[in-house]
Amino acid sequence: MHTARTTLAKREPSLYGVPDRLTRGRIINHLRALKDGQTVSLENLGTRVAPRFTQRNGAWLHRMLTKLERDGLVRLHTRGARTRVSLP
């Protein structure tokens, strides 16, 4: 006797249907294009890597960057309320 097995697809985190893993890659690629020591603001980075990025998505981007920093792939530079991003 065979039993039917249903496999549910694991839902991948995304913003507007673009998987976070693709956005992570776009972030790293954008930062690689910067000159050594150069940083980019969260707002500028967001508009470059997420097609429909707005300030309302700032918390999503910050969470993603925090994970990338934990993984040693980016560095966050925070002064007051402003955060900039660079490669480590």
Image: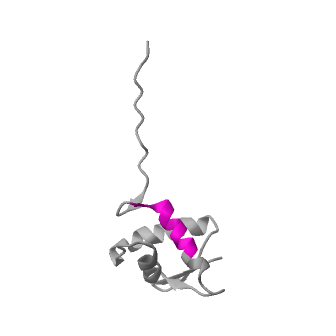
Percent of width and height locating residue 79: 52, 86
Percent of width and height locating residue 78: 53, 82
Residue 71 falls in image quadrant: bottom right
Percent of width and height locating residue 37: 64, 87
56 or 79, which is in the foreground?
Answer: 56
Lateral position of residue 36 relative to residue 54, left or right: right
Judged by its main secondary structure, the magenta piece is: helix
Question: At 52% across and 84% down in the image, what residue appears?
Answer: 40
Question: At 40% across and 23% down in the image, what residue appears?
Answer: 4
Lateral position of residue 39 relative to residue 1, left or right: right
- Seen in the picture, residue 12 relative to 28 is either above or below; the reply is above
What is the number of callouts on the image? 0
Magenta segment boundaries in residue numbering: 18-29
Question: At 43% across and 76% down in the image, what residue appears?
Answer: 46
55 drawn magenta: no
The quarter of the image holding the C terminus is bottom right
Coloration mode: one colour
25 drawn magenta: yes
From this viewpoint, which residue is outermost toward the top? 1
The quarter of the image holding the N terminus is top left
Percent of width and height locating residue 33: 59, 81
Question: At 38% across and 73% down in the image, what residue appears?
Answer: 51
